[in-house]
Structure formats: structure tokens, C-alpha cells
């Protein structure tokens, strides 16, 4: 959180700066970076110029019925609340992308040619969400809601995603339950350490390739802390998978609880 630093402090605190020159070069050369689909849109804008807009889009506040009608006509909903809030109750068909994850992950799943709707924790988050989306080329932001109680009162379609603590997950594994652990972290994180028996697919590739590795059995989805796992659960739910559970606290909680991992 500090606003200043020194070379000496960075050499002390940054593991990469503690490597030799040769090891640093080797690490950077062998790095694998995921390329989200929205990079193609950014390339187009860089070559042709972006659309000319004077101001940020100004989405309108929607009633639950207006929101549902737009979704029925092809709009895509993004729920920016936390994984526990999303898991407990959310709009059927919505993506779970936490507010701070929009710049990195919205471009993996959202279309450029369909209107976008936002589900917010509070209205004060609207400007930030819009700014994040606009910066990566999403300007068809039609509206938002922030009151799920009004939605539930209208008896409109809702879904849930299961939530598991790491203690609950280890208990299921110890009981030999028929359970798949799906790790949606990056290749680098996966190769560093993982839970024995887990399968892996980066969250950005789930939309297109999940049918290649996942069956209909109960699935516990894990990442580092829970945010990407919630996004993964929302992608799978949109694909028709049902028995889904987000592991709260992710690998950080797993290791803090003292459970075993496989290290490369």
C-alpha cells in the first residue's frame, strides 16, 4: 500500500529481484501468458482507432422486470458482488466477475455485440464498473440493479452456487465422496503447487473447452482466494452444470489450514 520504494527495499522484498541475471532471463523467457479474446478488439482499435465517445456510458437504473426483459432479448448480466453473495443467490445466467476483476476477466467472457447489464453491491460502484468496461472496449452498458431483494420479491429466475470451506472440502475427500476438484488458476500457479487429484483448466478457457475434461459429478472449484472460482462456477452454470461449489479462501486457505499440496 506504500506510495514509495527504493531499489534496496525491492531487492529485499521482490523474489524476482533476488534471482541472478541468468535465472531471471530464464524465468522470463519461459513464462506463459494467457491472451484473452479482447486483445483482438484492442488490436483493431489500435489499428483503426476506437469509437468516438464524448463521455462514459450512462447506464440507467432498471426495475427487475426491465432487467429480465433485456436479458430475454440477449443482454448479458455481470454480477460484481463477492463470491459468497453471488453463491447465495444470483440472477439466472449472470456471470460472476468481482469488481476488481473486470479489467482482467471481462474480456474473456463478454461479447462486444450484446448489451451488458450490471449487478452491483451498491450504486456507488457504478462509475468504477463502467470505467473498467469502457477501457477494454465495452461501451454497450445498458443498465444496472443493486437490490436483489426487489428481484426476489418479483419471483424472477434465481440460481445458487454451493460454497465450501476448505475444512468441508477435506472432509468430503476423507469420506471418499464422488467429487471433482477443478483448479482454475494459471498454469504457473498450478505447476507451482496443487491439490492431489485435482484437474486443471485456466478460468479463461472454461467457456470453450470445459466439456473436454468435466463430467456431471459434483465439482468443487478452487483458485487462489475464491474470485476466479466464482467466475468459473458461473461459466459452468451457464453451460448447464448444476452441482457446483466454490471453495472459499482457495489455495491460501487450504495451505493455511495445513493441508497437503503437491509441489513441482
Image: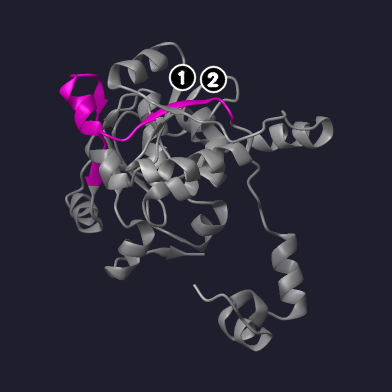
Q: Is residue 166 left or right of residue 94?
A: left
Q: Secondary structure at mark 1?
A: loop
Up-down relation of residue 203 to residue 59 (above or below) = below
Residue range (magenta): 139-163
Q: Is residue 161 magenta?
A: yes
Identify the residue at horizontal 27%, vertical 68% (top origin): 257
Badge 2 density bin: few <14, some 14–19, many ≥20, Cα 10 Å: some
Specify the label residue 24 is tagged with: none
Can you identify the residue that label 2 sits on? 114
Up-down relation of residue 95 to residue 114 (above or below) = below
Up-down relation of residue 167 to residue 84 (above or below) = below
Q: Secondary structure at mark 2?
A: loop
List x then y, in percent, for residue 119.
Answer: 36, 34
Q: How many marks?
A: 2
- The answer to whether mark 1 and mark 2 are in CB contact below 8 A is yes
Q: Examine the rendering and report whether any part of residue 72 can be seen.
A: yes
List x then y, in percent, for residue 67.
Answer: 36, 20
* Colouring: one colour
Can you identify the residue that label 1 sits on? 75
Identify the residue at horizontal 65%, vertical 88% (top origin): 8
Up-down relation of residue 7 to residue 113 (above or below) = below
- Quadrant of res 171: bottom left
Amino acid at each position: 500500500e506504500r506510495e514509495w520504494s527504493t531499489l534496496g527495499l525491492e531487492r529485499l522484498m521482490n523474489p524476482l529481484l533476488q534471482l541472478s541475471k541468468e535465472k531471471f532471463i530464464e524465468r522470463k523467457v519461459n513464462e506463459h501468458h494467457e491472451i484473452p479474446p479482447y486483445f483482438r478488439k484492442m488490436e483493431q482499435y489500435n489499428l483503426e482507432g476506437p469509437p468516438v465517445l464524448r463521455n462514459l456510458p450512462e447506464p440507467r437504473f432498471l426495475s427487475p422486470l426491465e432487467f429480465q426483459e433485456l436479458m430475454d432479448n440477449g443482454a448479458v448480466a455481470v454480477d460484481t458482488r463477492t463470491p459468497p453473495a453471488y453463491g447465495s443467490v444470483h440472477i439466472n445466467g449472470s456471470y460472476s466477475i468481482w469488481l476488481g476483476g473486470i479489467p482482467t476477466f471481462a474480456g474473456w467472457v463478454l461479447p462486444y455485440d450484446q448489451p451488458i447489464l450490471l449487478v452491483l453491491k451498491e450504486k456507488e460502484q457504478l462509475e468504477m464498473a463502467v470505467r473498467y468496461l469502457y477501457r477494454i472496449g465495452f461501451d454497450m452498458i445498458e443498465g444496472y440493479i443493486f437490490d436483489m431483494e426487489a428481484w426476489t420479491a418479483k419471483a424472477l429466475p434465481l440460481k445458487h452456487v454451493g460454497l465450501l470451506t476448505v475444512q468441508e472440502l477435506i472432509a468430503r475427500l476423507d469420506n471418499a465422496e464422488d467429487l471433482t476438484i477443478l483448479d482454475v488458476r494459471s498454469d504457473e500457479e498450478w505447476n507451482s503447487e496443487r491439490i492431489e487429484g485435482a484437474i486443471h483448466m485456466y478460468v479463461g478457457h472454461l467457456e470453450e473447452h470445459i466439456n473436454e475434461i468435466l463430467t456431471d459429478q459434483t465439482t468443487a472449484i478452487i483458485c487462489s482466494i475464491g474470485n476466479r472460482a466464482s467466475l468459473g462456477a458461473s461459466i459452468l452454470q451457464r453451460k448447464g452444470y448444476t452441482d457446483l461449489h466454490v471453495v472459499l479462501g482457495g489455495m491460501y486457505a487450504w495451505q493455511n489450514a495445513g493441508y497437503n499440496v503437491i509441489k513441482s
